[in-house]
Image (tube, rainbow, N blue to C red):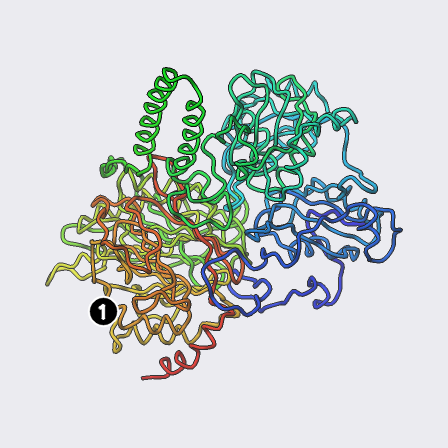
Amino acid sequence: MMQQPGGMARPEMPMEQQQPPQQQQYPAQQWMMMPPQAPQHQPVQPQPPQFWAQQQQQQHYGAGPTNAASGGAGGGADEVRSLWIGDLQYWMDENYLTSCFYHTGELVSAKIIRNKQTGQSEGYGFLEFRTHATAENILQTYNGAMMPNADQTFRLNWASLGAGDKRADDSPEHTIFVGDLAGDVTDYVLQETFKAVYQSVKGAKVVTDRVTGRSKGYGFVKFGDEREQQRAMTEMNGVLCSTRPMRIGPAANKKPMTASTQKASYQNPQGTQGESDPNNTTVFVGGLDPNVTDDHLKQVFSQYGEVVHVKIPVGKRCGFVQFADRSCAEQALSNLNGTLLGGQNIRLSWGRNPSNKQSDQNQWGGAYYGYTQGYESYGGYAPPQDPNMYYGGYPGYANYQQPQQWYEKLLLKSYHSSPVKRISQFIMELKLILLLLLAVGATADYVRPPLRKTLSFPWSKKPSSLPQQVHISLAGDKHMRITWVTNDKHSPSIVEYGTSPNNYSFSSEGEYTSYSYMLYSSGKIHHAVVGPLEDDTTYFYRCGREGPEFQFKTPPSQFPITFAVAGDLGQTGWTKSTLDHIDQCKYDVHMLPGDLSYADYIQRRWDTFGELVQPLASARPWMVTQGNHEKEHIPLLEDSFVSYNSRWKMPYEESASSSNLYYSFEVTGVHVIMLGSYTDYDEYSDQYAWLKADLSKVDRKRTPWLIVLFHVPWYNSNEAHQGEGDDMKITMEPLLYAAGVDVVFAGHVHAYERSSRVYNGKSDPCGAVHITIGDGGNREGLARKYKEPKPEWSVFREASFGHGELKIVNSTHAFWSWHRNDDDEPVRSDQFWITSLFGSSCLAENGPELRKMLLEP
């Protein structure tokens, strides 16, 4: 009997048989299980992951008898044995699909469909099984069940493109649009919210960003009963889903396709040419209700993929929808043709490819409304790996060159008019051109918001034993350090914790310290280490046997893992904006390359900083290193870093370091080294000796990613803090280069900058990517002036506040994105794929040099 997929339990068998084909097992370590080892490759400019690379000509599976007879055991040549699987996240590859169904023993093959140009997943694929009966059983058992290691359900259907035994569900579907969804709402949560009230709910889909996997804040719910759909439109509007009231609206409703409607949809003469063009992604929509708007049309079609442009010409009952990917357009054509939208049955057919301008000057009004197929309109950026990566990027950089061609055509048209009419038209068009250029000029350059004031924290009386300034950090293999402060000197340094609320199965007693600084005396600072802990698990805990209950989540055992990165935080209004944006991303560990509180000798600011970051720092581990604002040295009176070391204890002892100012940790296949820019770093220093010893312990098979953080940047084209990191760079860069460090994060400069892989001042494919991210929101403001001309190694630079997110997808590829604080909204302004040096020729070539340096006294 086939097992329900919820737990994905497998039958007992030898371990080597439990692994999917071509998958390799690696020794487990701290919060980490290795994915399959990547093949050898020479490092090049960042490209999409190799497991997304197109290995062969894209093909359709399950297309009737041809596919059924192609091989595999069992079944006749006239039966469909393949299933279509959709809504796949970008990290889901063939190995993942195989692992989901391998235990059935009936899976023949799994195939992800990828974009021919970018090599990235199109979000769907095909599964072939040994028999039709098995495929049907899988469809009935798994469709709508939760996928392993993902907050979404399986979406399965028969894989048939018009031939053979097509088993698609032709029953009516009545869909509603659901907006204003909270970021934590998944397909399953949305479905269950409605299913608890309406029995005919057939499924739900939350639309997500295909790169980050983050919710776009809206989705769709399908009903089998039209009456329940109509009730839900009014009854569920304003009802809470998670933490936000939902906004309900109409969406396209599926009706059984008839021969007449199917035939009518392809009578448009555009269809034949558009259908044969593999690059065409434009869908013509006819029979539109006059009340349907561009936004409404986009919402309906967005459920099938990224929509890059929508236009309903004024006064016309038709429109055009352009997708980023061909497969999305195909799905929309197949599923929406003949459905109800705003009270009218819409007719769909292929539109013309906008890049083919000479063959069709009339589509979309002959101007394409400013959309260009190429990427030159993005202000000089190179084409991204994914066409939707710059979606929502710089407004105003697009739509500049194309309108010029539009007006050229209008002027050409006016040439054939009468002289008086030509003059009148020319004057009007000239005015319009000037207005357009003014509008583009006004929006092309990003205007940064003004500085914000330092936050105020009014004093309020609290119980002396109340835990305050709670934060956590990684503390060795499967352990977490919990730190808090109490004003009661007799409060115990005990943490009680467990995996369910208010039920503490474990406890741990730690240590405590305190310090005095001039006229200030700190509270009692507690440090307690808890563990061993389970991977990817939420724990509930209480500090000092009283006070509120907190909770934290341990990092995952295997990729992917996400790091939030922001330095130079401070305590301003922009700091709060940055923290709010970090809180919205699903990160596992926060890394901070120095300059935390900007207390600058005023010790009370350390307390208020602890209060400010507690909501985030008590729930996810914060790993920090020191900056210049942590020094607080007063000659003959106060030592450096006394406040920082007392309050923010990092795992230096666990990593065999003698100082809290430099240490390392490992998490989910990543080895992270935190260095000190403000402690000795020359070749005879303790830090240099420790770095050599730490690098000698790195096992790239266990931790294929190697990341380094420190405060003062080595590669900086900003005029601020020029040359301050040169001495440390001269001493330590050869070590990091020989070790094959992948990424270096720094702060100090209050701006953002990303380099290419670089070494010794020049781009080098075996060097590290250097990222300066000292833009968390400090009170000193932004460093706005950059050196010109820009160095050849500098790829992107901008003086704005923001934060970064590093999502390590597997052992070879990670996705980096930087999110600018645009007023109070995070805007993704820079992004690219990073290819790890693990498995490259760089490590093999530099291995002898590294061993030589590590062995030198």
- Whether residue 107 is visible to the viewer of this picture, yes or no, is yes
- Whether residue 547 is visible to the viewer of this picture, yes or no, is no
Judged left or right of residue 648, residue 536 is right
Q: Assess disc 1: are there few (<14), some (14-19) or many (≥20) residues with their C-alpha within 10 Å of its C-alpha.
A: few
Q: 488 or 290: nearer the eye?
A: 290
Q: Secondary structure at mark 1?
A: helix
Relative to 57, is 659 above or below? below
At label 1, which amino acid type do we have?
Asp
Residue 395, by quadrant, is top left
Relative to 375, is 678 above or below? below
- Residue 701 location (% of width, % of height): 53, 70
Q: Residue at x 24, y 35 (%)?
A: 458
Q: Residue at x 72, y 48 (%)?
A: 60
- Residue 758 location (% of width, % of height): 35, 65
Relative to 502, is 441 above or below? above
Q: 95 or 56: nearer the eye?
A: 56
- Residue 108 location (% of width, % of height): 77, 57
Residue under pointer 1: 727
Q: 499 or 319: nearer the eye?
A: 319
Q: Quadrant of the C terminus?
A: bottom left
Q: Residue at x 23, y 54 (%)?
A: 788
